[in-house]
Image (tube, rainbow, N blue to C red):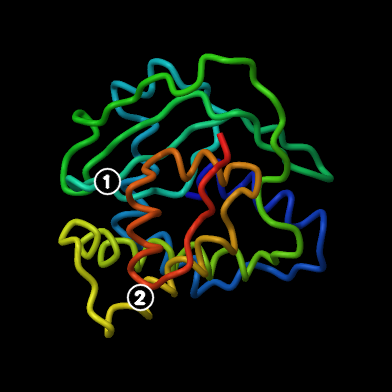
Amino acid sequence: MISPRALAALAFAAATCACGRPHEDWVGRLQANDLYRRADAVRESPSCSKVLPTESGRTLPVPERAGGYAVLFYPVSVSPDRSDVSTPRYRAVFAPAATPAGDRCEPFNNGASRMLGPAVPPGVSNEDYYRAEARVFESLPRVSALYGAGAVAPADRPTLTKFFDAFTTIAEPGLAAYYYRLNPDFWEWLRTSGSHSLPKPES
């Protein structure tokens, strides 16, 4: 099953570049990934299913210091020629080894909603998208473990670079500040560990 986030992103990608069919190997690797399946199950948890519209998009997971991950859910507008994201409305926290019954979904933004641009950076093909998403989910457990330990050896830095490069390939451009605010400590740790990181929002 393809997630609503992937459907929204790929609708945009298909409309804005010359794209072939998604590479089946990357699709298979992604759909076989336990963390990917767990992140998709968050929307069906008792806490989230009560409040989330079915058409909500989901961000990529961001590690929490104490373990687990945080994601944001946002309204997404999909049309034949483009797909746009709006201001995130809910934040959810989940632990990969736990059941969805323990997931927490809470309001994230009580202000006015506004359009924040495309669901995926322009020029990303279907194959590019699936490849990068698979790499994000495959690298996240190690990145999360390093973050929890608070230390990074030189041999670990390529893992951080691989994660960040894949992340920025497909992360929703207009949500950069919201990704940072999900866990500022994580992005600053990534920066001080010798990797590129998201810029700190001005406000």
Which residue sits at x=34%, y=39%?
A: 41
Residue 153 in percent (x, y) is at 23, 79
On the picture, is 27 further left or further right than 142?
Answer: right
Which residue sits at x=69%, y=56%?
A: 121
- SS for dot 1: loop
| Residue under pointer 2 | 159
On the picture, is 126 further left or further right than 49?
Answer: right
Residue 179 in percent (x, y) is at 48, 44
Which residue is more in the foreground, 167 or 80?
A: 167
| Residue under pointer 1 | 64
Which residue is more in the foreground, 47 or 189?
A: 189
On the picture, is 21 further left or further right than 163?
Answer: right
In the rendered image, the quadrant that contains the C terminus is top right
Relative to 54, say whether 41 is above or below: below
Precedes in sequence: disc 1 or disc 2: 1
Q: Quadrant of residue 48?
A: top left
- What type is the residue that disc 2 sits on? Thr
Which residue is more in the foreground, 107 or 54?
A: 107
Q: Are marks 1 and 2 in contact (CB under 8 Å)?
A: no
Residue 11 in percent (x, y) is at 72, 49
Packing grade of label 2 (10 A; few <14, some 14-19, many >=20) is some
Residue 25 in percent (x, y) is at 49, 75
- What type is the residue that disc 1 sits on? Glu
How far separated are the C-alphas under marks 1 and 2?
18 Å
Q: How many marks?
A: 2
- SS for dot 2: helix
The circle on residue 157 is none
Relative to 70, say whether 136 is above or below: below
Which residue sits at x=49%, y=39%?
A: 58
